[in-house]
Image (cartoon, rainbow, N blue to C red):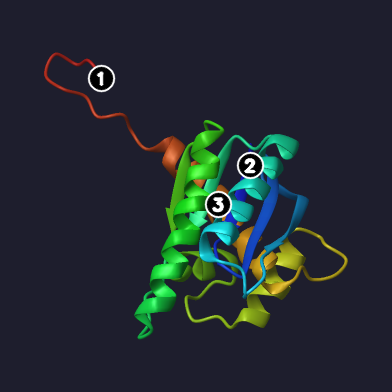
Amino acid sequence: MRVIGIDPGTTSTGWGVVESNGSTLQHVASGCVRTQVGEPLPARLGKIFAELTRIVIQYQPQEAVVEEIFVSQNVQSALKLGHARGVAIAAANHRGLPVHEYTALQVKKAVVGHGHAEKRQMQEMVRILLCMGKSAPQDAADALGVAICHLNHLPARLLRPVPVVAGGQPP
């Protein structure tokens, strides 16, 4: 299973492609889509959409995973982040990928083991889990962490029983 994780942002959108072969995780590629702060928001969003679409075409993931928004006190920042997140979801959906979402707490628990991990701890655990020589940049490491979280949750999702309705037939 090959998954692209996305950590959306209007200035820097992290992305990371991870492949799972049984219980082994492998780093395929990662990076950041960077935009200029002075550019109009629609141009920045267009660049994020175009770059993520190109990345999906290049690396051919089977699923996409996007980190959910953490709403802080700055409403304007949350709205801009929501735009970037929407563009990331649209880019994946545009290429026919199923899109999954996880909170930062879920990602930190899956990667580090507790939900209050610091950014540096996340970077280091991503590096270790993916046998990378050096840590990825922070936004790319966060995106790789989202992908790892999804791949760790995947076996549990696949093993859930299919609900059966009256007559013994699945819905």
Residue 53: mark in rendering: 2
Residue type at mark 2 is Thr
Residue at image mark 1: 170
Q: Which element type, helix, strand or loop, lies under badge 3?
A: helix
Q: Is residue 67 visible?
A: no
Q: Which amino acid does label 1 sit on?
A: Pro
Relative to 56, residue 115 above or below: below
Q: Where is residue 101 in the image (x, y as percent from the top left)?
A: 44, 53
Residue 35 percent location from the top left of the image: 66, 66
**Do the residues under discs 2 and 1 have CB atoms within 8 angstroms?**
no
Q: What residue type is labelled 3?
A: Asn
Q: Is residue 13 above or below residue 94?
A: below
Q: Nearer the viewer, mark 3 or mark 2?
A: 2
Mark 2, Cα crowd under 10 Å, few <14 / some 14-19 / many 20+, is some
For the N terminus, the image quarter is top right
Numbered mark located on residue 152 in the image: 3
